Each structure stands twice: as structure tokens, then as C-alpha cells.
Amino acid sequence: MSQRKIVLASNNAGKVKEFNALFTPLGIEVIPQGVLGIPSCEEPFPTFIENAIAKARHASKLSGLPALADDSGICVDALGGHPGVLSARFALSDQKRDPSDADNNALLVQQLLGCTRRQAHFTCTLVFLNSEIDPEPLIALGHWQGEILETPKGSSGFGYDPLFWVPELKKTAAEMSAEEKNQISHRGQALQKLLAQLPKKLS
């Protein structure tokens, strides 16, 4: 496969690093949209798939490049699936216009105080488009089951990783190496599914 450039509809440094680790061996460079001066897209929809498609079309339209969008989040059983699509903005308020990972984690811990039902899962929806008007986007889904801790553990990863406990490994996502996480995470699963379909899409 010849060297290709695709635009990532995100400026999340953690996501950019994870995607490039997997795409570089395929001769594909993933460029975050901010490098190209592309502003973030609105995410008004209630589902991950709708938001991911909107972000991919927006990035492809403004860059003229194939686009990859990732809409991911954490869905907590005891909260009826929330924060879900609002995961990155969970702690948004008049006081916190741009909540940090720590803000979001603190709110999740607070909302689960005294709760014994700690099951949750990360979900990832990836969408790849060859162009803004591509009528057949590639869509790949991944899920990662775990539990929410009462206190964060670990310093790797990003987002809710320090609270996300994986019982079979007896560690949080933030205690895993990048290589280990990429093998089993929601994003790793979705990426493997996407990569299996991508060569036909790029041919």
C-alpha cells in the first residue's frame, strides 16, 4: 500500500498516538485536523455512530482528504448508559467550560458514591470515509467490559482509564502499556475490524 495521508477528526493527543502506532506500519500517516486548521465539528446526536459520521464528513470536506473519525465513551450500567456520548464533556458546567479528564473522573466517582453496581464498558465507533460524499462509510465497533473503581489507579492512558478496572487482568486501563491496551481495548478492537476492511476501501 502506497503512502497515504488521512485526516483524523480529533485533536486528542492520546488518540492520535494510538492511531499512528497502528497505521504507520501500513504506510498511512494520520494527521490531526487541528494541524490543518480544521475546527471541531458539532456533535449534536444521541448516538456514537451519528456523531462519528458527522465528524468524518466535516473533516473530509475541509481537508479534501480521506477522513477517520472516532466517537468513543464510557457507558456505566448504574447510570443508564451515561455518560455515553457526553463522556468528554461529562463535567461541563458554567464553571467548567472545558472539563479536564480529572474533572470528568471526579464527577463519575461522585455519582457512583455508595453504589455497589460498578459494571461499565468503553465503546468505540470508528468511521472511515474516502471523501465527504462517500456513500458507503466503513463503520467498525468495539466494546471493552470492566468496572468503575472508587479511586483512580495508574498514570498511563487518558480519559477514564484510571478508573476503568479490568477484572481478568487485575489492573486498570491506566496501568497497562500502550501495546497491551491496543490489543484488548475498545479502540483496539474497532481498529482491527477497520484495518481488515481498509485495503479494499483504499484500492
Image (cartoon, rainbow, N blue to C red):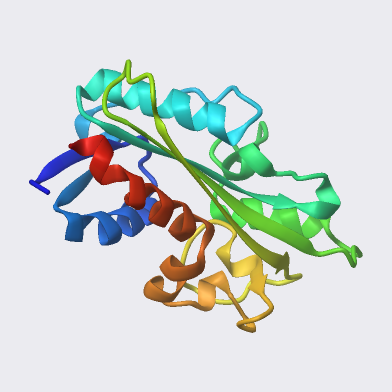
What residue occupies the far top of the structure in this picture? 133
Left or right: where does residue 92 sit relative to residue 194?
Answer: right
Q: Which of 120 and 174 is in front in this view?
A: 120
- Give the x, y percent position of residue 21: 27, 61
The image quarter containing residue 88 is top right
Q: Tell me if I can see residue 176 in this picture.
A: yes
Q: Up-down: is 45 above or below 145?
A: above
Q: Up-down: is 199 above or below 76?
A: above
- Give the x, y percent position of residue 145: 66, 63
The quadrant the C terminus occupies is top left
Left or right: where does residue 134 sit relative to residue 171?
Answer: left
For the image shown, how many numbered marks are present on the structure? 0
Identify which residue is drawn at 49% across, 60% down. Answer: 158
Q: Nearer the viewer, residue 21 or 13?
A: 21
What residue occupies the far left of the structure in this picture? 2
Left or right: where does residue 175 sit relative to residue 23?
Answer: right
Q: Nearer the viewer, residue 13 or 48?
A: 48
The image quarter containing residue 102 is bottom right
- Give the x, y percent position of residue 22: 29, 59
Identify which residue is drawn at 64% across, 67% down. Answer: 164
Identify which residue is drawn at 59% across, 22% down. Answer: 44
Identify which residue is drawn at 73% across, 65% down. Answer: 148
